Amino acid sequence: MDNVKQLKLTTGEEIICEILDWADEQEGDIVVRNVYMINSKDDDMRGYRYYNLKPWMTLQEGDETFVTLNIMHVVAQGKPDLKILGQYDQAVINSNLTEEELNKKVRDYITKMKDKLQNQADLEEEFENVVWFPGSDKLH
């Protein structure tokens, strides 16, 4: 994971990728693979910032696909945070799944969500005669 870097480009985009070969100091190209763009969205209502990763170039993901990046377009580089590294690992793993494996993973996730919703509905039925008041302070 030492060769996975977060890069800020002259376009303002931030990407995370595995760097296979650095360019020389003056000019040249960096050879990278598994390149994902880091997107962020602010939820001002809740005060959260959400991040997600998406492939930087269409159909250019996977261990067998290499991309070159001109060194002149890189403004900064850094070591990614552990949280983003975990998301990056999952993105790389998922990009290498076969269609059948990916479909199974999606079906399992849907089943898990349906079970969770059913459990929540069962709890609501159990407490259907309870009147809930707004606020977190409860007096009993």
Image (spheres, rainbow, N blue to C red):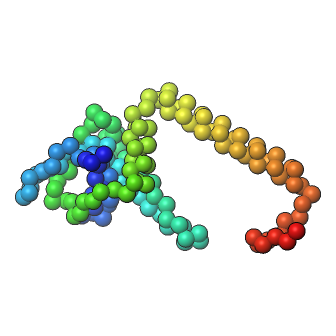
The reply to whether residue 15 is visible in this rendering is no
Q: Residue at the spot x=30%, y=64% of the render?
A: 12
Image: 104 above or below 41 = above
Q: Position of residue 9 (x, y in %)?
A: 26, 61
Q: Residue at the spot x=89%, y=64% of the render?
A: 131
Q: Position of residue 111 (x, y in %)?
A: 66, 36
Instruction: Give the residue at the far top of this rendering.
Output: 100
Instruction: Give the residue at the far front of this rendering.
Output: 140
Q: Residue at the spot x=16%, y=45% of the render?
A: 21
Q: Position of residue 73 (x, y in %)?
A: 20, 59
Q: Quadrant of the C terminus?
A: bottom right
Instruction: Give the residue at the far right of this rendering.
Output: 129
Image: 109 above or below 37 = above
For residue 1, side relative to residue 40 (left or right): left
Task: Tally the marks.
Answer: 0
For residue 83, side relative to residue 139 (left or right): left
Q: Where is residue 46, by image quadrant?
A: bottom right
Q: Residue at the spot x=12%, y=51% of the render?
A: 23
The reply to whether residue 5 is visible in this rendering is yes
Q: Position of residue 10 (x, y in %)?
A: 24, 64
Nearer-the-camera pick, 46 or 137: 137
